[in-house]
Each structure stands twice: as structure tokens, then as C-alpha cells.
Amino acid sequence: WVSLLLHGSWTEQTCGGTPIPVRQPVLATAESWARNPQCRLVLGEGEESDVELCVTLQQPDARMRPGSPFPFEDRLRELFVCVLRLDDPSERLVVFDKRRIHRSGTQSAASLLSRRREVLLRTRLPCPGSYAIVPSTREPELGGATQAPFLLSLHLRCKPDLIKVDAPPTEGWAPVQEKQ
């Protein structure tokens, strides 16, 4: 397994919400969603025809903040993460298109939209291929906060030289930390 830890944060410029109608009213639009940080993952050609990917999106533990009452829901955002197919490795998605969400068999590469400390998804990605992994909150704004930090963990079952990750600081990402 190759593990990558990507620290990021949503700010006014990088928080676009999630435009899926699982909960009404839908607060985000397909266009506002594109403001969310996008991590581009490129899988090269290798011995494998596909790669197993496990993704977790985590927000800070509310128990670590003084004065936060149990069950801490006042401090948790509704999280969502999805993996979308890219036509080009350098492409940045400018609109949410649910038809681009990767599917592996009958499984969609999208987490549940949930007010929890973390959400996760597991899928298989064909090689070679280019993908965008997009973490988001339900709301397209931060409700008075200046930023909302998060941690995106990627775990891929493949050789390290098969992977290329692009998580630009201009989109709210800190430098990539790799563990093998």
C-alpha cells in the first residue's frame, strides 16, 4: 500500500458546497462546487490493470475544542468526497457533473453526505487513468469561520512509481506527505 496524507482547508475562496439533492434545500450549485479543492491523481501504466483506492476525509475532532457539548454536532460539518474521471491529467473541473463520478461495477466512487468526523469510500480505478478527488462540505460557505481544516488520506494498493498526485497550494492544499 502507498499512503498519502493531504492537509487542506476550506476558505471563502475554496468552499463550494455539494450540489446533491439528498437533503433539502440544496445549498450549492454545480458551478459553486468547482471552488472546492481538487486533488488530481494520475495512474500510469504498470503490471496492474486497476488499483484499489481507499479515501478518508476527516475534520478535526470536536472533543478537542473547549466548551463543545456532546454529541459535538455543533462543530461538525456535513462532509462528502467523490472521485471523478478526468479527460486530461491537468484538467480542473469547472462544474459538478454526476455522470463523471467514477463507477466500479455497481459501486459509485462517492461517499455518503454525512455529519460525522470522517467519511470514506473504497473503489477500484483503471490504469492508466486520470482522476479528481474532491472533498466538500454540504454548505457553500463557512458560516462566519475564516477556514475549516480537513485531512484527506489516500491509500492505494500499487507500486509508488505508478502514482502522480497534484494538490496545488492555490486550492487550499499543504505539501503532500507520503508514507510507504
Image (spheres, rainbow, N blue to C red):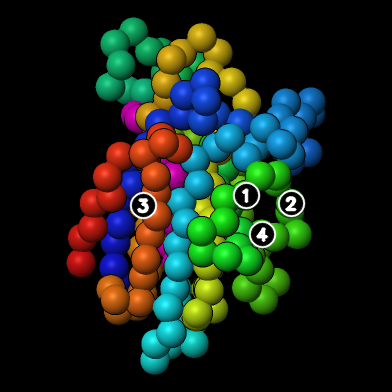
User: What residue does disc 4 label?
Assistant: 101
On-image quarter of the N terminus = bottom left
Residue 145, position in %: x, y? 46, 13
- The residue sitting at the left extreme is 180
Which quarter shows the C terminus?
bottom left
Crowding around mark 1 (Cα neighbors within 10 Å: few <14, some 14 to 19, many 20+) is some
- Three-letter amino acid code at disc 1? Leu
Q: Position of residue 64 (x, y in %)?
A: 28, 22
Q: Which residue is mark 1?
A: 93
Say whether residue 23 is left or right of residue 157: right
User: Quick one: label 3, few (<14), some, or many (20+) residues within 10 Å?
Assistant: some
| Residue 165 located within the stretch drawn in magenta | no
Location of residue 59 in the rendering, given as x and y in whole percent from the top left corner: 40, 34
Mark 3 or mark 2, earlier in chain: 2
Q: Helix, strand, or loop for circle 4? A: loop
* Amino acid at pointer 4: Ile
Could you classify mark 2 by the number of other residues whose Cα lies within 10 Å: few (under 14), some (14-19), or many (20 or more)?
few
- What amino acid is labelled 3 in the image? Ser
Residue 86 appears in the picture as rendered: yes
Q: Which residues are magenta?
A: 53-61
What secondary structure is marked by label 2? loop
Q: Amino acid at mark 2?
A: Asp
* Sequence-first tag of 3 and 1: 1
Q: Element under label 3?
A: strand
Residue 97 tag number: 2
Query: What is the magenta segment's predominant secondary structure?
Result: strand
- The location of residue 153, given as percent across then percent down, is 36, 52
Q: Which residue is mark 3?
A: 153
